């Protein structure tokens, strides 16, 4: 088994998940900025052309970050980051979907259609006119989330879950590309600093971060 990874907040999210789980598998790095993930050799494995992907020993390739993390969680018992029973798993998935649908999808597309347009305009269908609205949606929903997580250490309660890692990697990236966090959101700010202090936050950063000037 190996992880096909690269620079970027989504590959970082899987690396951070693996560090939190204590999972050590080979990582094959790709040149995301150079478009290696969009070439035929990689798309033969992952037709979506997205990084990361998990290649199993039998040749099966799993794409999509959440699917990768849930698979790794299931085959590596102990210290589950998606829940230990049906109720915990449902709550974890509920918040993961809320975070993705309300915040991270809008944040990432706001970047792709604006600051990242030169990089993405030949890779995905871009709508530059939508960027300001998408960024505003993300900020609005961050305020909504801030009002819900007061008194909690993490998004789902007092246990670190996949939703925390998804949101942290997104916001850490977004903060340097035109979508800074609002420091007046005190609950969110405390949560972010709590996540930032975890060893996995630093340990999951790609070596190219300083050269690229982005957190991924």
Image: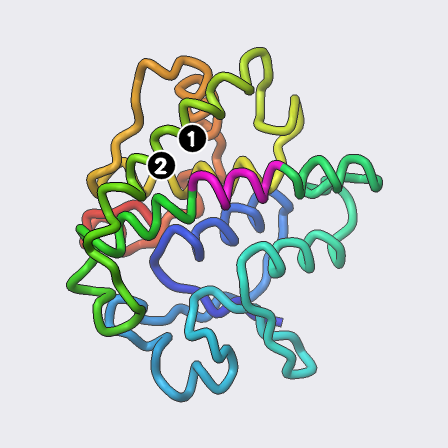
Q: Give the distance between the C-alpha atoms of the residues marked 1 and 2, in whole angstroms.
A: 6 Å
Contact between marks 1 and 2 (CB within 8 A): the answer is: yes
Residue 147 to residue 74: above or below: above
Q: Using the image, tell me which numbered label, if any, was put on residue 141.
A: 1
Instruction: Give the main secondary structure, helix, strand or loop, of the magenta stretch.
Output: helix
- Which residue reaches farthest right? 85
| Label 2 element class | helix
Judge left or right: residue 151 versus residue 70. Answer: left
Q: Using the image, tell me which numbered label, if any, was put on residue 21.
A: none
Check disc 2 and report the residue beneath it: 137
Task: For the N terminus, give its image quadrant.
Answer: bottom right
Query: Quadrant of residue 160 in the image?
Result: top right
Query: Is disc 1 surrounded by few (<14), some (14 to 19) or many (20+) residues within 10 Å?
Result: some
Residue 28 to residue 76: above or below: below
Query: Quadrant of residue 106 in the image?
Result: top left
Q: Residue at x 28, y 72 (%)?
A: 123
**Number of on-image labels:** 2
Residue 132, horizontal then vertical, whole percent: 22, 42
| Label 1 element class | helix
Q: Residue at x 30, y 18 (%)?
A: 183
Q: Which residues are magenta?
A: 95-103
Residue 48 to residue 129: above or below: below
Residue 69, horizontal then vertical, whole percent: 62, 54
Q: Residue at x 62, y 59 (%)?
A: 67
Q: Is residue 101 magenta?
A: yes
Query: Is disc 2 surrounded by few (<14), some (14 to 19) or many (20+) residues within 10 Å?
Result: some
Q: Residue at x 52, y 68 (%)?
A: 53
Q: Is residue 61 magenta?
A: no
Judge left or right: residue 150 versus residue 157. Answer: left
Q: Nearer the viewer, residue 37 or 149?
A: 149
Residue 47 to residue 31: above or below: below
Residue 158, horizontal then vertical, whole percent: 65, 22
């Amino acid at each position: 088994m190996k992880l096909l990874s690269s620079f970027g907040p989504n590959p970082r999210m899987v690396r951070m998940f693996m560090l939190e789980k204590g999972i050590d598998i080979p990582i094959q790095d790709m040149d995301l900025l150079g478009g290696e993930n969009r070439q035929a050799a990689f798309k033969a494995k992952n037709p979506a052309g997205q990084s990361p992907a998990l290649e199993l020993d039998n040749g099966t390739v799993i794409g999509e970050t959440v699917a990768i993390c849930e698979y790794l969680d299931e085959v590596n018992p102990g210290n589950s980051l998606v829940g230990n029973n049906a109720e915990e798993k449902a709550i974890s998935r509920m918040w993961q979907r809320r975070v993705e649908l309300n915040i991270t999808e809008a944040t990432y597309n706001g970047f792709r259609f604006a600051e990242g347009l030169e990089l993405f305009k030949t890779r995905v269908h871009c709508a530059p006119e939508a960027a300001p609205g998408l960024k505003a949606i993300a900020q609005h929903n961050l305020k909504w989330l801030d009002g819900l997580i007061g008194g909690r250490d993490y998004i789902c309660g007092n246990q670190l879950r996949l939703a925390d890692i998804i949101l942290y990697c997104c916001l850490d990236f977004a903060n340097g590309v035109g979508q800074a966090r609002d420091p007046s959101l005190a609950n969110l700010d405390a949560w972010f600093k709590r996540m930032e202090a975890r060893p996995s936050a630093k340990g999951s950063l790609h070596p190219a971060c300083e050269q690229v000037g982005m957190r991924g």
